[in-house]
Image (cartoon, helix red, strand yellow):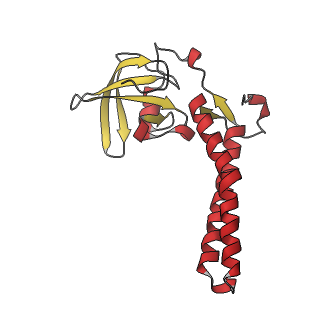
Amino acid sequence: MHVEMGEQSMGDKPVLLTPEGLKKLETELEFLKSIKRGQIAERIKQAIDYGDISENSEYEDAKNEQAFVEGRIIMLDKMVRNAKLIDEANIQTDVVSIGSRVLLKDLEDGTEFEYTIVGSAEADPAESKISNESPVGKAVLGQNKGASLEVAVPAGKVRYQILDIRGGWQPAK
């Protein structure tokens, strides 16, 4: 699915995604619409068959799940409609940009780690993907290889040096 920026409605913020991130959202959206909705409808039907719905916890649970899933569908649908793909060919390696893989060194303890800078919709620290809106993401954007920076994080201030900038969004092995 190719998404054009012109398809956005006024006031909708672009959702920056890698092609991989867009596919993940589309897959979840399709699952919720095609499978999960039917499962919940069946749960509601079974709960109604139990009798009085006014004091039926199974019915209440199913209706709450239905409300959550419908809200998630609306949110995912809006994100997919407003998707702006990060083009790997346009990722610079001289300065940090969205889509860059950045190798950082903690100047306090010398540890090194790598993050991929992605849009907030795709951020997943467990996969070393941090948002361009996070404290570290904001601090490294536009910086050059070798730059030292100080980042205010919830635990205080941390000092990093950018050791390397690479294209692509898959963490290096």
Q: Is residue 155 above or below residue 68?
A: above
Residue at the image position 46 percent from the left and 40 percent from the top:
124
Residue 18 can be seen, yes or no = no
What quarter of the picture does the C terminus occupy?
top left
Front-most of 156 and 128?
128
Q: Is residue 77 above or below residue 69?
A: above
Front-most of 5 and 142?
5
Residue 29 can be seen, yes or no = yes
Residue at the image position 62 percent from the left and 82 percent from the top:
56
Q: Is residue 10 above or below residue 101?
A: below
Where is residue 149? Give x, y as percent. 35, 26
Q: Is residue 67 above or below residue 46?
A: above
Residue at the image position 25 percent from the left and 30 percent from the top:
111
What quarter of the picture does the N terminus occupy?
top right
Front-most of 10 and 52?
52
Q: Quadrant of residue 16?
A: top right
Left or right: 112 with respect to 140? left
Left or right: 105 with respect to 27? left
Where is residue 22? Give x, y as percent. 62, 35
Residue at the image position 76 percent from the left and 36 percent from the top:
8
Residue at the farthest left position: 109
Residue at the farthest top position: 94
Where is residue 7? Give x, y as percent. 78, 33
